[in-house]
Amino acid sequence: MKTERSEMILVTGAAGFIGRRLVDELLRRGHRVRCMVRRATELPAGVEQVRGDLLQPDSLSAVLEGVTAAYYLVHSMGAGKGDFAEQDRRAARNFTAAADAVGVSRVIYLGGLGETGDNLSHHLASRMEVGTILQSGRFSTTFLRAAVIIGYGGSSYEMVHSLVKRLPVMITPRWVSTRNQPIAVADVIGYLAGCLEEPRTAGQTFDIGGPDILTYKEMMERFAAVEGKRLWIIPVPVLTPKLSSYWVGLVTPVKAAIAIALIEGLKNEVICRDNRIRDLLPIRLTPFDEAIRTALAEQHAGGVL
């Protein structure tokens, strides 16, 4: 059933990089939006704020009351390596139980893209597990598996931008040769909002990525070129992901715990193997260089344009 504009849509993680942009887009499309927040947050006019915490099950019934569809955009990547997976697991289970109890019909989840199997990074494995937990609910789950998201305010963008800006010569590990399919944040928002309005996406899992397949080395070189900089990258076989993450934490503003999760994930190739969503939601995909130029313009302007 197609979502009617009068129905209440819940956004969890509404204060985050993706959540804030999604709330703006849902309002622009005329949807009624409720945001789950742990504390009062500055959000656009017309948004209903309800306090709740996914790690506190008793707080969720009020958050979900009257909600028809919900976006699950919460993850604990910034927590310690031994803690974030268990926190994400508990949060997803609490949400699933509460959503089932009040009769939520649809959930749209944004997770990470990566090959399945035992070799996933802790971060990507946790994202996959959260998707499986949500899919166990009685509601219909749409699981979007995203590659690296390019946009001002995102951790991946901040990491690459800082490296290119501060280090004209880089000694890097072999992961710079790993291929990925970066996607502009505007395209992620287009897919998230589009799935709500396209009933054929309900209950489905989709890979989402941009039009370019690049190695991380190529991404950094093209980022530098857009900024008019020269960049020399020298891969070496002995720099481990853990050492790389400490190095990234020292030279970029990205928190060490987040840097560890991001760097560990770089060993996994993140390429779309299934492009069915392009037929259901035929949005124009933003080329990598254009996504970088947009992010830089937003950064210079101090916010989303």
Image (cartoon, rainbow, N blue to C red):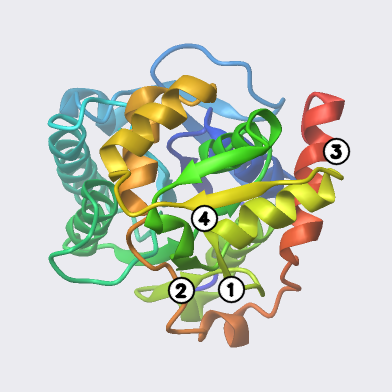
* Image position of 9 (left or right of 54): right
Q: Residues within 10 Å of mark 3 (few under 14, many from 20)?
A: some
The amino acid pointed to by label 4 is Val
Residue at label 2?
A: 271
Q: In front of the other: label 1 or label 4?
A: 1
Q: CA distance from mark 1 to mark 3?
A: 23 Å
Question: Is the C-beta separation of discs 2 and 1 under 8 Å?
Answer: yes
Residue at label 4?
A: 148
Give the camera-side residue of 271 and 278.
271
Q: Determine whether the residue tagged by mark 4 lies in a helix, strand or loop.
A: loop
Q: Position of residue 273 (x, y in %)?
A: 42, 83
Q: Residues within 10 Å of mark 2 (few under 14, many from 20)?
A: many
Q: CA distance from mark 4 to mark 3?
A: 19 Å
The amino acid pointed to by label 3 is Ala
- Marked residue nearer the N-terminal end (1 or 4): 4
Q: Which residue is rendered at x = 33% and y = 54% of the image? A: 237
Residue at label 3?
A: 297
Q: Determine whether the residue tagged by mark 2 lies in a helix, strand or loop.
A: loop
The quarter of the displayed image where residue 55 is located: top left
Give the camera-side residue of 51 and 209.
209
Q: Quadrant of the C terminus?
A: top right
